Image: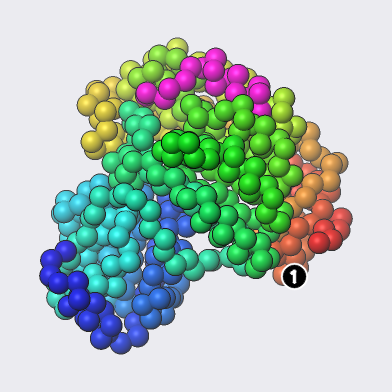
Amino acid sequence: MKGEKSRLADLGSAQPRLKACVLTWGCQLNQHHSEELVGVLKRAGYEIVSRPEEADVVLLNTCMVRQRAEDKVVGRVGELARLRRRGTLIGVGGCMAQGRKEELFELCPEIDFAFGTSGWDRLPELIAQARAGHRPTYFPSPQGWEELPVSRQSRFKAYVTIAEGCSHACAYCIVPLVRGPFRSRPLPRIMAELRELAQAGYQEVTLLGQNVDAYGTDLPGGPNFAHLLEEVASIPIPRIRFTSSHPAYLTEDTIAAIAAGDNICEHVHLAVQSGSDRVLARMRRGYTREEFLEIVAALRRRVPGVNITTDVIVGFPGETEADFQATLDLIEQAEFGTVYVAAYSPRPGTQAARLPDDVPPEEKKRRLEEVLALSRRIALRLHQARVGSVVEVLVEGFLPEKGLYFGKTRDFRTVLLPGEESLVGKLVQVRVEQASPGALRGEVVKEKVA
């Protein structure tokens, strides 16, 4: 972006009150980043609307973890192009923009401006330039820590970022390139935000980072993730979650902190990616199959009832049928509550992108479907074992297509239940009556007394 900052600031302040819509793709961290985007826009005087058709400016906060995510953004921009006839501006930001930079205008010629994964406090200036007829971009290298205003979508659930970026550099992963090196947020800032949320009555907080259990590894002599969890356990918020964890950084001390914290939920998302040592080494994951299963066993010993969920990539370059069968075997042994599976797609600039993508698309599809089928069988078995039990559920909303309310247990299982609007945002006790691979179903026994 060119020009004097003061001149651009003047352009931003001179604009009338405009309406903005933010659309989001990707992980929970991206969802929270969109809350920050909205916070920045509100601070600049924008009115936030939910429908692009109502907006003067539409912002797309994007994901780049797989090719499919990029394809969805390109398609959505094409759909939104019709709005430009009425003067609507389209801006694309986040991971895809940071990764593609100027190439983004070739992929999406309809966009008016683009911005990366940092420096969002200058967004109003970019919009002002676009309104003046320019096509500005701003892609600073992510570094340091930015404290941005947050406009939270929920009155009872919140996200709190504890780390940004990643320095592990798995062979297939775009995160270090678009989010920058691993950076821990100062512990006092984290605790201050948590105390504010507790004071506001929030029931659940999720600690976020691309690699949360590496917290503190960039702070010589500073707190580590286990210490952070010990501190967080003192905050009067009923439920604390965290995501995502990397097996190479999950220590015995962290497992002990999970077990000891009354408000630390019994759920750990631990991405295994493959059950083959050969493939894990090619992926540069930093652990073996045996080491991963030892972590799973330690979690189950120390944290009764823990639900371990995971990510799996099928069709990584060089993955043989024997490698794939090793993954299926590990999934069965680990008894994951949920497996999020994706077919490998090369990401530009990663080490794996230089390897031949030699697993045919139809074979990737077959392997993906096999993982899903096995995951559903395991989930059904685990859910059926819960029938007749009473579980604590935080009611999150209503599903019109099912005519039921939904929520999550402490161990991150979805529960469907009949009820009324007054239950949303409350912790209730639910007796489980039915089970399916995707959810439990039951009736409210009582609301939890605060």
Q: Is residue 157 above or below residue 357?
A: below
Residue at the spot 38% in from the left edge and 41% down from the top edge: 182
Choose top left, top right, bottom left or bottom right for residue 92.
Answer: bottom left
Query: Residue 167: where, in percent of width, then height?
Result: 36, 35
Looking at the rendering, in which quadrant would you find the C terminus? bottom right
The residues colored magenta run 283-299
Looking at the rendering, in which quadrant would you find the N terminus? bottom left
* Element marked by disc 1: helix
In the image, is 70 to the left or to the right of 212? left
Residue at the spot 47% in from the left edge and 50% down from the top edge: 186
The rendered magenta stretch, by its main secondary structure, is classed as helix
In the image, is 6 to the left or to the right of 68? left
Taking the magenta stretch, the answer to whether it contains residue 384 is: no
Residue at the spot 53% in from the left edge and 66% down from the top edge: 152
Q: Is residue 252 above or below residue 62?
A: above
Choose top left, top right, bottom left or bottom right for residue 279.
Answer: top left
Residue at label 1?
422
Amino acid type for the residue under numbered disc 1: Ser
Foreground: 184 or 37?
A: 184
Q: Is residue 305 above or below residue 5?
A: above
